[in-house]
Each structure stands twice: as structure tokens, then as C-alpha cells.
Amino acid sequence: MSAAPFRSATRHRATFTDNTDHSAEYMFGVEAARDAWLAHGLCARPSDRTTAESAVETFYRRAGFSRPEFVWVPSPPAGSDLIAAEGLATTLSFAGDGVQCVSARIATMLSKSRRRMDALIARGRSDWPHERRAIETARAQSPDNSARVGISPNAIIRAAVWDSLRTSLFDGAAAAIRTLMPAVVGGVSWYGQQEAHRVAYYDAYRRFGLARFRSDDVELLDVHTALTGATGWWWAFDNVCVVAERPTALHAEPIPGRVHNEHRLHHPDAPALEFEDGRALFVQHGTVVPDWVVLEPTVERIARERNVEVRRCAIERIGWDTYIDAAGLALIDRADDPGNVGHTLQLYVISDGWGRSDHILLAVNGSPERDGRRRRYGIYVPTRISSALDAAAWTYGINGADYARLVRRT
């Protein structure tokens, strides 16, 4: 990807093209383009510093500022530490004349460009309530299948590109990285590779001939595309740009049951995400956990843990059978699972170690994982529930009698 702008022959014109052949080959291209951007978002190779600096310099120039000094740091937390130590955050304000700072100008410039492109895309939509239903349908099936049943390209691209990449990268990897940092960094954070959903979405429209954006918006999109494919997080200040290197390790797995290649951070035995300076995160199936959950889970540590999700991950790490025996959990009720023939539902009372008790339903997933195994999992349910069938029904928002009549659950 190059930071060199694409120049349109017609200045500032924008149109939505009437490309109604949305069952054609380009729907396969939507998946390929998304997966290429997913690879950028999960990339753990060193940044392309030349491309990144060239793209940022273009943003500065368009915002009316000259080329900044670039300061590269080994991780986003190191970037926030530097910003605090050097007092850079004091130059950023959205009050009074603060809108004149480069960070605000770049953010405004990109926001206005996206609004113009969104307005153009909206012209090709059917009525919005119908479009919302179409997006929900598109989220549940592949782009090819959606196209076959007449789902609009808008709904398909929203579900297969924007929603998918946002789930994997912005709400997944970037959100996990933020747990390593203070609540307020002191500047506008751009997430680089982890905001690929923004550029991939608009790029899909122009790539497949669905919209012709204004040439100035195309040029900004090209620059943003190059930057997103080149590096990680960055912060713009009037004379200095702080840029964080990409991770040195980033491990993820497909999210079970999803159809648009959504991923979540996970590594069974080591940090799922690690930076050059040693900042690291242990993540179990998308849940950020303390290192002991992966390296040395024990019944005693589980009992002391306040966070329900962390406890669940630690229990799954050592295995439910082992945990039940070691913790001496009391079985309240057991029943055959009518929605999952051949498996049972077990309801236990479990102490959290802080003087409180919860009820937990132990069940087997109705659908196999990608490796063919069926995951055994626990769900915390209200303590007023004392029947395994009622507990399973509660998770679906129905009563036990209705759940008992299920043929199959997933």
C-alpha cells in the first residue's frame, strides 16, 4: 500500500453508481478484501516507518501544519507514558482556540470526509428500516448467500466488512490494549492497524464500483489506507507525532459461530499480545485475564477472584471436573438436556470466596468447535433457580416447561 494519493480526473465530484448485479463475483472479493485487512490488523511485524511517516506528514500538511518530529515508541502504553512525561497533553484542548491544534484539525478533516462518503452511500440504500433488517440477515450468512437471496450490497458490506473488522480489531484487539493504559491518555488516540474497519468499508465501495467519491475524499482515503496498513497507534501534537510500534506477538482465533471471519485474542499457554518493551496481555478466548489464569490457576486463586469472567476462564483452564472435585461444589440438580441429546445439565452452588454464593449451570455446547470438540461451559444463573432445566431455560429467556420441549439448541 502506498501513501501516494490517487488523483481523480474530475475534481470533487461524487456519485453513487447503480450497480445492481450484487450476485456477481465481486461478493467473493468482499471477503478477500476483508481478510486482507484483518491480516493487517493482526500483523505483528515491524512497522513500515517510511510509509507511516509519509502518510502522517500528509495529514499534517492538509491540516495546515508542517512535518512534525517523529518519536517512535515500542508500545501504546509507552506512548501514553511519554505523552505524560513530556507534558504533550497540555497542548491539546477542544475549548476556546484549542480547535486549532493539529489533532483536532486532523480529526475534523477525517470526520467530515467520512460524513460526505456516508451521505453518498446512503443514496443507494432502500428505506432504512428495511436496510436494518437486511443488515441483520447479512450478519448471519456469507456474502455469497446474502447476494443470492437479494440482500443489498450496502447491507452485505456493512455486515461482512465494517461489523466484522470492528469486532475483531477495534472492539477486540484495541480494546484489550487499552486495558494496559490509563483511562485518559491526554490526546486523541488513533489506532492504526486496529481501525482497519474504517478504511476497508469505504474502500470496498470504490473497489467494487458501487460509489465514486469526491477526489479529495479519495485522496484522504488513500493516505489513511497506507497509514493503517503500515503501523500501530499514533498521537498527533503540533510539533511532535508519537507513533507506537506494532506488537511483536499477536495471537487470535476465529470466534465460534460467526460467519464473517471474526477473530478474538487467544493463546492457551502464553501472552496473546506482547510488545517489544515487555508489555503483554494474557487473553483466554477474548477475555483479558491475569497471568496466573494461564500460568498457574488454582482453586484458591479462583475463590479469591472477584471478576466472574476471570473465574470462569480459570475454571475452564483447569477443567470443570477437576475444579468441581477440588472445590467440593454441591450439586443441586441434574437433568438430561432436551436440547442436546446425550448430554446432561448440572446445577451447582459455588462460593466466590467473598462470603457470597452463586448458582452455576454446567452444560455442553450444542454445536462443535472448529476442532470438532464440544466445549463444556458454565453459566452463572440467579440463586432463586434450583432446577437445572429452569436454569437452562433462563439463559434463553423462557420457562423450564418450554425448554423441555426443545428439539435442539445451538
Image: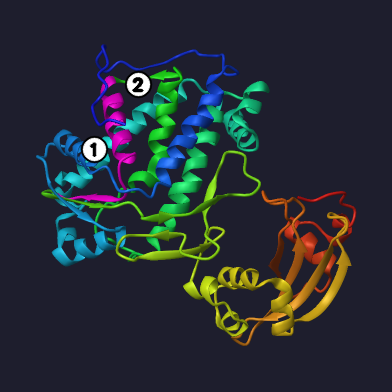
Q: Is residue 261 visible?
A: yes
Camera-side residue of 296 and 401: 296
- Dot label at residue 68: none
The quadrant in which the N terminus is found is: top left
Q: For the magenta stretch, what is the residue range?
A: 215-237
Kind of residue at disc 1: Thr
Q: Which residue is drawn at 84% across and 70% down?
A: 387
Q: Is residue 319 left or right of residue 19?
A: right
Q: Work out whether mark 2 precedes mark 1 in sequence or the reverse, and give the earlier one.
A: 1
Q: In this view, does 168 lie to the left or right of 84?
A: right
Q: In this view, does 217 lie to the left or right of 86?
A: right
Q: Which residue is drawn at 74% across and 74% down?
A: 321
Camera-side residue of 216 and 55: 55
Label 1 crowd (10 A; few <14 / some 14-19 / many >=20): many
**On the image, numbered disc 2 is attached to which residue?**
213
* SS class, disc 2: loop
Kind of residue at disc 2: Phe
The answer to which image quadrant residue 382 occupies is bottom right
When the figure is inspected, residue 199 is found, relative to residue 408, above or below; the finding is: above
**x and y, in percent, of residue 86 in the image:** 14, 63
* SS class, disc 1: helix
**x and y, in percent, of residue 215 in the image:** 28, 20
- Dot label at residue 51: 1
Q: Give the overall secondary structure of the magenta segment.
A: helix
